[in-house]
Image: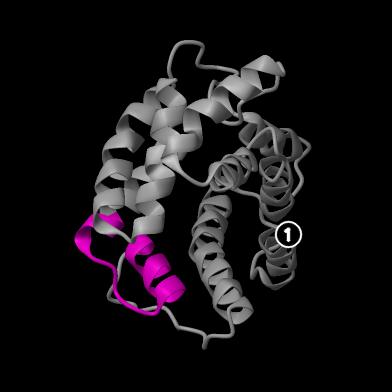
């Protein structure tokens, strides 16, 4: 997130129409930013793992290209569909904290890059986008599905929060989770044992 935040800020220096805030220009800027962000994330991840950079393939769509640049091989149809659904569900989430923060910056008539950087900075927080990483760390700490119930009961006994179960907006059940679950279950069946284990830990915690 730190790299993405800094990269988007830096990309503003090379925008070909920095002073044009017309609706048409903003549309073009949005497309350019949307195209460059997955390239940035994929390249950074490859570099930090000591792997060669994978240039984008012009024959692939947005999601397929991101997964291709990230993993060095073309993804299958299910992987592309899963990531596509994930992005759509997040986009449909409406006025969340990062979207609101970006709009506040944009409302001052600042440039689009500044607004997106504001959004990324907000998304990074552990009470917003960062909660995904916190939840995954908790699942890894539990270690085994057989320990999930004990984990929940211990948290309740200590009156501690169970990360990522519950939502500030959705008080009954996050409707996105119903859709995510189908894909997560299928992903757990297809991928290595570690992924299946983490999925089963999450499932048992949720049920308890």
The dominant secondary structure in magenta is helix
Outermost bottom residue: 52
**Residue drawn at x 57%, y 72% as measured from the top left:** 45
Q: Is residue 91 visible?
A: no
Q: Is residue 59 visible?
A: yes
Q: Residue 200 at x, y = what percent? A: 37, 40
Q: Which residues are magenta?
A: 62-80
Q: Is residue 146 above or below residue 7?
A: above
- Circle 1 SS class: helix
Q: Which residue is mark 1?
A: 2
Q: Is residue 55 above or below residue 75?
A: below
Label 1 neighbourhood size at 10 Å, few (<14), some (14-19), many (20+)? few
Q: How many marks?
A: 1
Quarter holding the N terminus is bottom right
User: 122 or 145: which is nearer to us?
Assistant: 145
Q: State the colouring used for the structure image.
A: one colour
154 to the left or right of 36: right
Q: Residue 6 at x, y = what percent? A: 74, 63
Q: Is residue 155 above or below residue 199?
A: above
**Residue drawn at x 70%, y 22% as measured from the top left:** 160
């Amino acid at each position: 997130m730190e790299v993405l935040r800094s990269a988007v800020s830096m990309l503003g220096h090379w925008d070909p129409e920095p002073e044009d805030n017309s609706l048409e220009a903003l549309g073009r800027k949005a497309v350019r930013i949307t195209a460059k962000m997955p390239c940035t994330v994929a390249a950074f991840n490859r570099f930090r793992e000591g792997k060669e950079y994978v240039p984008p393939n012009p024959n692939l769509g947005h999601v397929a290209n991101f997964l291709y640049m990230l993993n060095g091989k073309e993804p299958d149809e299910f992987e592309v569909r899963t990531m596509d659904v994930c992005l759509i569900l997040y986009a449909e989430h409406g006025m969340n904290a990062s979207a609101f923060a970006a709009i506040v910056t944009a409302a001052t008539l600042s440039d689009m890059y500044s607004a997106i950087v504001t959004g990324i900075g907000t998304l990074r927080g552990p009470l917003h986008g960062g909660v995904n990483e916190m939840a995954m760390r908790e699942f890894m700490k539990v270690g085994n599905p057989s320990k999930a119930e004990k984990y929940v009961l211990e948290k309740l006994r200590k009156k501690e929060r169970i990360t990522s179960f519950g939502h500030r907006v959705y008080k009954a059940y996050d409707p996105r989770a119903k859709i995510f679950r189908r894909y997560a279950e299928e992903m757990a069946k297809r991928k290595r044992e570690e992924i299946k284990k983490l999925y089963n830990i999450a499932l048992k915690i949720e049920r308890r």
